[in-house]
Amino acid sequence: MIGLRHFKLAGNTEIYGSFCCLPGYDPFVLYLDSPPSRISRRSLFSYGQWRVGDDGVTLHGGAEYLRFEDLGSPSVERLNGKIGASFRSTTGTTLRAAIFRGVKGAKYDKESLEPTQFVGFNQSFDDFNGTRWTRSALAVDQRFLGGIRAGLELSRRKLDIPGLGCDTQDNPDCLARWQERLHRAYLALPFGNRVVLSSEWRHENSRLVAGVADSLGGVLPYGLLTDLLPLRLWFKAGSGDMLLETWGVRQRATLRDSSGQDISGRTAFSITNLRYSLPFGDKRLLASFTVNNVFDRRFRFQNDDYNGDPKAPLFHPQRSGFFQLTYRY
């Protein structure tokens, strides 16, 4: 028996932006006859989940019609299909697989009601606006006795990035073909209810497949390999929670400078962060204090967040402290 378990349908988003000056004009002079530039996005999407019998198999499907227009980039209009499946066994094993497509809109699109994940895989990325992508992913998660959890996730994304492939006349949209591999493995070991030790491995390998590295202007690498190894220790400290984490980082980047010469760089370092959180009252109010880069390490790191979003860096270049109050309602 196949039954409909869940269904979503939502709507329309449109954003407008006006700019006073065209590139090359004096920014302190307002040209009233300059035509306004517009950024807009319209989308209609639908998601469904269908449970197959009583064996723990669920089929996932989705579709999104999208039209996106951005300043200085060709408009995008396409139908993004999404298909996947998941299986949950009685022994604590979960298998997930999916193939799905998307288009990166403006950062304001994060206010959309569209799910940020599909079959548990992320579908919200920090790419350049207008990037078309296709992701295929496979994952296995396992729960063991004693609350131990482990898992492995393998995925690949094919990207067409506008504005970085203006090397041939038969490429009017100036699309550069990139390939990105994202892999992740994790292990969590609880010791009672007061201590949890976890380890993780994140691997990201992105490279230019079709296009000219010179078009990146010696600013962005056309090959970037990153391995992240965070080790975390969480434990109860009085009425609050303490989190101590150490990140091991290894990275290799290759770019081409303005003279056409390839430049390669390697880096390896570790960063330690510390956070203490304390709830108040009925636990709706939470105060936390964080110290990033506890030992004030100096390092080199190429952030692959090329779009500048989010603004918070993954690693802080110097020792810094943050105090935060959070109220839940």
Image (spheres, rainbow, N blue to C red):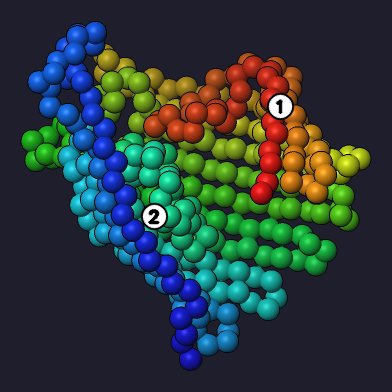
Name the side, left or right, on which 251 lies relative to 210: right
Residue lying at 55% horizontally and 20% vertically, measured from the top left? 300
Numbered badge on residue 135: 2
Viewer-nearest residue: 323 or 218: 323
- In percent of width and height, residue 165 lies at 21, 34
Which circle marks residue 323 in the picture?
1
Residue 308 sits in quarter: top left
Q: Mark 2: which secondary structure? A: strand
- Does 315 appear above or below 237? above
Provide residue 236's location: percent of width, then percent of height.
86, 44
Cα separation between marks 1 and 2: 37 Å
**Residue farthest to the right, as pictured:** 238
Establish if 311 lies above or below 237: above
Callout count: 2
Q: In this view, does 235 lie above or below 77?
A: above
Q: In this view, does 28 lie to the left or right of 266?
A: left
Check the image and name the residue furthest to the bottom: 1
Q: Which of marks 1 and 2 is in front?
A: 1
N-term mark: 1 or 2: 2
Q: Where is residue 254 in the image (x, y as percent from the top left)?
A: 40, 26
Q: Left or right: 37 with respect to 273? A: left
Residue at 20 percent of width and 20 percent of height: 20
Task: Name the amino acid, label 2.
Answer: Arg
User: As shown in the figure, which amino acid type bears the numbered disc 1?
Assistant: Phe
Q: What element carries label 1?
A: strand
Q: Residue sitting at 56 percent across and 74 percent down?
A: 87
Frontmost residue, 237 versus 146: 237
Say few, some or many: other residues with alpha carbon within 10 Å of mark 2 (under 14 / 14 to 19 / 20 or more). Answer: many
